[in-house]
Image: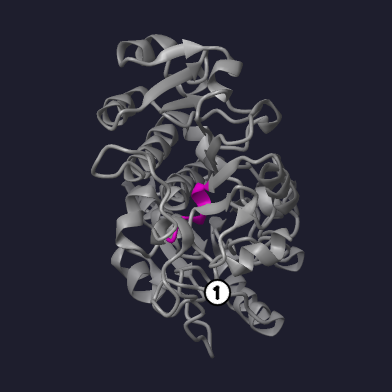
Amino acid sequence: MKIGVPKESSGETRVAIVPNSLTKLAKKGYEVVIEKGAGEAANYPDSMYEEKGATIGSAADALSCEIVATIRVPDYSEMQEGQILICVSDPFRNSTQVKAIMDAGITLMSMDMIPRRLSRAQAMDVNSSQDNLAGYKAVLLGAAHVSRGIPMMTTSAGTIRPAKFVIMGSGVAGLQAIATAKRLGAVVYASDVRKTAAEQIESVGGRFIEVEGMDDFEDESGYAKPLTPEFIQKVNDTVCDVAKDADVIITTARIFGRPAPITVPASAIKNFKPGAVVVDMNADVGGNCEVTVPGEIVEVDGVTIIGVETLPTTLANTASMLYSNNITTFVNSLVDKEGTFAISEEDAILVGAPEGSDFYVNGMGGVLICKEGKIHPKQTRLAGVIE
């Protein structure tokens, strides 16, 4: 089969497949057609693709392949019934778009629906690969905008105390942020609504901020559960109190398929010290900070608020490489022992793990969202949103 890789939409610097993945894809029988210039923004020129055996073509050439692989949803109006689209569709936020793709007869596989707790799926988990980079870059942005040094320094002119970082949330992005800030020499405090996160935070050098009455607010897919407004307020108050004298505050709280929860209310900003920096990692889905302006860096009450959207795009070369590894592992898994491409509706990665297992969450999980205009029966939660 042919895999087409069109150029991403404006503002997206990543590319779905990088040259080094082509050899692995060829071993499974795939041919790859790359739209001219698709990898240039990520520093993968056409010549690198040609050296690895790809065909360079037009957007129409890429969009006419049996499989179309992208990061964001492409212009599917150029695609035909029966084609397969593999991308990040964010179906719970973009249900109308997903329904339109279904109505067009296109089989949609959304990589952000990978059931992350299945060990076989971890090498395909685009959320983890991209969040990891986002957490790293968030720390660098905070360090670049704060007006003081990060590590402790002993000089002839005096001793400089290390900067204080507060990381709100310790999922994949948060843990990488903690580790990166620690490597820079900061003193790092971190919070999470999942009690099990305390050990993880401490393992990468952070100090856990415990909230009285905290339980383990984690669902079976590994994501944080939605919290009551009262407990959210309690968490916010506790963590923001710790952050009052922080130099950099990084917010990472993201609930799958829902708007980002507010973890830094406007009232808290007034209590932060002058010169502090807040890096809001979820500006693209509403923001964790109440005064974040998506896509902009603003100053409020002497505090710098960074609302850069989709942080992995600022590390396009590495982010593309990791996404390409994810998608290569995924499409190669769809080739059976006889070398035939097959979509098995018994595959837990595609449709969600069997009901009753540790990985099944009310139809959540599973890449195969729709095929032949239908949502798989196991994906009941998704079906309710789309229909």
Report whether residue 250 is seen.
yes
Q: Name the residue under label 1.
A: 362
Identify which residue is drawn at 63% across, 42% down.
Answer: 309
User: Left of 312 or right of it: where is 99?
Assistant: right
Quarter of the image that includes the C terminus? bottom right
Segment tinted magenta in the rendering: 110-115
**Res 51 quadrant in image:** top left
355 or 124: nearer the viewer: 355
Residue 111 highlighted magenta (yes or no): yes
Residue drawn at 47 percent across, 19 percent down: 34
What residue is shown at x 45% (from left), y 55% (from top)? 350
| Residue 176 spot, x, y in % from top left | 39, 54
Badge 1 element: loop
Q: In this view, does 181 lie above or below 270?
A: above
| Corner quadrant of residue 103 | top right
Of residues 374 and 136, the one drawn nearer to the viewer in this rendering: 374
On the rendered structure, is 101 left or right of 189? right
Question: Would residue 146 appear left or right of 132 to someone viewing this image?
Answer: right
Asked whether residue 152 appears in the rendered view, the answer is no
Left or right, 89 with respect to 138, comes to: right
Q: Which residue is drawn at 56% across and 23% down?
A: 64
Position in image of residue 318 (x %, y %): 40, 33
For residue 339, above or below residue 250: above
Q: Give whichever of 297, 229 is nearer the camera.
A: 229
* Image quadrant where residue 81 sits: top right
Q: Residue 84's x, y, as percent? A: 53, 37
Per the image, is 186 magenta? Answer: no
Locate residue 266, reporting x and y percent: 76, 63
Camera-nearest residue between 130 and 236:
130
